[in-house]
């Protein structure tokens, strides 16, 4: 009878033991404190990053972001201004001469990447964050570069790392980010002049470009680590827990997707609106219409001869062109 009595209380004791043990297991947090860093001074890069941060803030997360494009603090959102190299501050022709050549850009991007890391890590506010041994953050959200120096922030704070990639492909950094390398016979390198390798010549060229770019990047960074050592060179880089990529399967060629890659293409796009009324000519128009906006786009000046070339090409395909320049408009009728 005593045996039966003890057996009756066994389920009760089991419930108490599991309840006590479960109380020591940390539950998933509902709202995280996020440290975000925009490393690149490009407006299009910030458009993608800011859309992600805006979504996180709307969901109740607390975000502190280091960015060269400040817009003001608000609830659960704090900005820290970083003075960095802003791209597209000049003429398009100069930009093409500087960054349009594969051989030139691959020799420059490792040094440029480390310079951008230095700008962030030498910021007084970031130094204060690193000095705090008990970090107030739960995760680091940062845009990667052609150097793994960007993972230093997560290493220093001992936090999970998430990369935000505003372009569809990871290129030569894919192995470092995911431990995987896409087949160069199927997926085009970001430096290639084609979007999808179709012919044998394109596939061969894609393999050569991929090998060349990776070798040059590794060798150049090793030279910089020897000549200009930094504190982050003392730490082994860590892979990201997640990679948010500006890509969507509906518009990109089929390719393998590693388990830590999340496609969020289009998160920065706003709902389409109606075009504004431009003139009475458009109201009575019965033929095709193309509207083009020229002039300064984030401080980018388009040379006159390139404007004329674009106009000449498009004019052969459309009946009416309405062109908006910085200070004037022009209507060309075929």
Image (cartoon, rainbow, N blue to C red):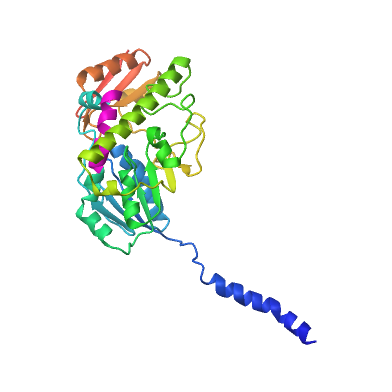
Q: In which quarter of the image is residue 145?
A: top left
- The answer to if 8 sits in the magenta stretch is no
Where in the figure is residue 139, as x and y percent of width and height? 38, 55
Q: In the rendered image of this protein, does residue 224 appear above or below residue 12? A: above
Q: Quadrant of the N terminus?
A: bottom right
For the point 33% across and 31% down, the residue is: 277
Q: Residue furthest bottom?
A: 2
Where in the figure is residue 55, as x and y percent of width and height? 40, 50
- The answer to if 115 sits in the magenta stretch is yes
Q: In the rendered image of this protein, does residue 201 appear above or below residue 249? A: above
Asked whether the viewer can see residue 41, the reply is no
Q: Residue furthest right?
A: 1
> In terms of depth relative to the viewer, which is nearer, 20 or 278?
20
Q: What stretch is highlighted in magenta?
A: 100-116
Where in the figure is residue 62, as x and y percent of width and height? 36, 58
For the point 35% across and 25% down, the residue is: 212
For the point 45% across and 23% down, the residue is: 196
Q: Main secondary structure of the magenta part?
A: helix
Q: In the rendered image of this protein, does residue 2 appear above or below residue 129? A: below
Asked whether the viewer can see residue 155, the reply is yes
Q: Quadrant of residue 143?
A: top left
Q: In the rendered image of this protein, does residue 333 appear above or below residue 87? A: above
Q: In which quarter of the image is residue 300?
A: top left
Q: Give the left or right position of residue 88, taking residue 263 as reference.
A: left
Where in the figure is residue 296, as x and y percent of width and height? 22, 31
Q: Quadrant of the C terminus?
A: top left
Q: How many labels does the image show?
A: 0
> In terms of depth relative to the viewer, which is nearer, 328 or 72?
72
């Amino acid at each position: 009878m005593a045996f039966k009595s003890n057996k009756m209380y066994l389920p009760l004791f089991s419930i108490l033991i599991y309840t006590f043990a479960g109380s020591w297991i940390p539950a998933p947090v509902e709202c995280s404190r996020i440290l975000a860093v925009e490393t690149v001074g490009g407006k299009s890069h910030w458009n993608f990053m800011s859309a992600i941060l805006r979504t996180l803030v709307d969901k109740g997360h607390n975000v502190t972001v280091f960015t060269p494009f400040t817009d003001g603090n608000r609830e659960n959102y704090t900005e820290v201004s970083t003075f960095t190299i802003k791209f597209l501050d000049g003429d398009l022709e100069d930009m093409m001469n500087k960054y349009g050549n594969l051989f030139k850009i691959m020799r420059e991007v490792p040094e440029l990447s480390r310079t951008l890391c230095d700008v962030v890590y030498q910021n007084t506010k970031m130094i204060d964050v690193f000095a705090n041994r008990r970090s107030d953050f739960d995760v680091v959200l940062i845009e990667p570069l052609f150097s793994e120096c960007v993972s230093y922030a997560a290493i220093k704070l001992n936090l999970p790392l998430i990369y935000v990639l505003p372009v569809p492909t990871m290129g030569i950094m894919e192995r470092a980010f995911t431990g995987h390398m896409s087949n160069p016979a199927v997926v085009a390198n970001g430096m290639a002049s084609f979007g999808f390798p179709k012919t044998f010549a394109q596939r061969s060229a894609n393999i050569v470009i991929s090998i060349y770019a990776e070798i040059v990047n590794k060798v150049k960074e090793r030279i910089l680590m020897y000549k200009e050592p930094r504190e982050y060179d003392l730490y082994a880089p860590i892979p990201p827990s997640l990679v948010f990529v500006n890509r969507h399967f509906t518009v990109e060629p089929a390719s393998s997707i590693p388990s830590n890659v999340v496609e969020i293409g289009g998160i920065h796009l706003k709902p389409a609106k109606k075009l504004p009324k431009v003139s009475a000519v458009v109201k009575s128009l019965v033929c095709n219409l193309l509207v083009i906006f020229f002039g300064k786009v984030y401080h980018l000046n388009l040379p006159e001869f390139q404007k004329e070339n674009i106009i000449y090409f498009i004019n052969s395909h459309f009946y009416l062109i309405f062109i908006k320049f910085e200070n004037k408009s022009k209507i060309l009728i075929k």
